[in-house]
Image (tube, rainbow, N blue to C red):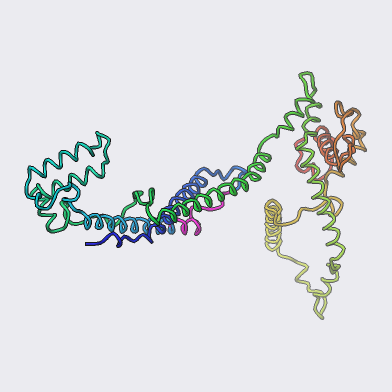
Amino acid sequence: MSEAADIPVHLMPVAAILGTFALVGVLRGAYIIYENLSYDPLSRKPAPAVALDSNPFMALCSVVVAAIAGYGSIVAKINKAYAESEHALFDPFDILGISEATGGDKPAVTQAYRELAKIHHPDKGGSQAMFLKIQYAYEALTDELGMKNFKMYGHPEGPVSVPSFQLAMPKWLLFPEGNVAIFMILLYLAMFGAIGYIVVTRMNQKEPEVKATMDSNTVSLDDLGYLGRCLSPSSSHFDVLLALASTPENIMWATENLEKIEQQRADALEEKKNAKPEKKKDDMAFDNLDDQGWDEEDDEEDENAKMAKKAEQEKQQRLEQVKKASGLVKEPLEGIDDGVIGQKWVLKTLEEKGNWPPKDLSFLNNQKFDYNGKKVSALDHPGLQRNIQMTMGRINSRMLNTHPALREYSIF
């Protein structure tokens, strides 16, 4: 039989670490699954960081399974050692408080058993474990099968029978004893401290993401408050448009877009300045001539060839449109590329038609707005001026639809 010293106490911390890791891994995996199942591809929310079919998720599942298997095996091994130790130390005479000579006297054994049972019965406030030992001691000295098992295996229950794999939380992990207790308590404190640190850090990282998502998907409280102050039941349609154009969020977005456009324009000018001059098409045509002069066959293109060439050109145009829509090519910029219309063209056209600046800006006339640390009027704020110009452009859309690029798609 095994002795108490044979219990592998050095494996207890390993079981604690594996059990905690498995628990955290299961929770992490459940969160990843929830993120993926609740994700809507049509929403503006970012996709989950870890996909269900990704290698990181598969690796997490594999490691968690390995941790669970290791934990279950170690727990079973230690529990078996404890059971063998209890079997080895089992002494029915000592438990019942009788001598070995009295062991053959069943009435004396029964009397000792009854006296101890009255004291240690759980209904009388006794210990369940001690009461069970008393019962085993009684069976070892009075029951025929118990006596046989005690003589052969040292315990009335027979040989030690413990499963080779156990996932239940054992008592020695929850309530460690002896020298192991100090180490286990320190280990638990360290693990829970680490888990708390990870959770707090993760929450702090999530706060900016949540705020950004809220800002991008909802109307801010500042905007609602501003609209409430500017508008009333008697406000006109124009007042409503001006209020929407001058909300803090719309001014911020317009200002940022203007800065991006100016940066793109500066980059484009610099790129155009440093670009090498292209060779003229006429020169390239002459370079392609051979020594014999013009090829008469080139002047008479076949009709099918012309149609194929036209189809290829249309295909290339569609490809260019797709590239522009997907951001693979740079959009032409007003003032840099030919034929581009934008804010400057809208402003120029409105001025020519006498619709700019607006004759009356309603409640905006007396308001001041922050710009670069100064208080400026509505039309002196670049971002707000852009919004008002675009608002006026939409109001006068029929008048603006005189440009060939606009009339091509105009319904008027």
Give the answer, above or below, for where 277 lies relative to 325. below
Give the camera-side residue of 233 and 138. 138
User: From the image, which quarter does the C terminus lie in?
Assistant: top right
Residue positioned 78% across, 41% down in the render = 252
| Residue 57 among magenta residues | yes
* Horizontal and vertical percent position of residue 328: 70, 57
Give the answer, above or below, for where 33 lies relative to 282. above
Quick check: 88 left or right of 374?
left
Quick check: 259 left or right of 3?
right
User: From the image, which quarter does the N terminus lie in?
Assistant: bottom left
* Horizontal and vertical percent position of residue 62: 43, 58
* Horizontal and vertical percent position of residue 251: 79, 38
Give the answer, above or below, for where 171 lies relative to 292. above
Quick check: 227 left or right of 336?
left
Give the camera-side residue of 85 and 303. 85
Give the camera-side residue of 152 and 326. 152
| Residue 31 among magenta residues | no
* Horizontal and vertical percent position of residue 194: 53, 52
Query: Going by the picture, which residue comes out furthest to the top?
Result: 234
Give the camera-side residue of 158 and 305. 158
Query: Going by the picture, which residue comes out furthest to the bottom?
Result: 291
- Residue bounds of the magenta highlight: 47-61
How many marks on residues?
A: 0
Q: Quadrant of residue 76?
A: bottom left
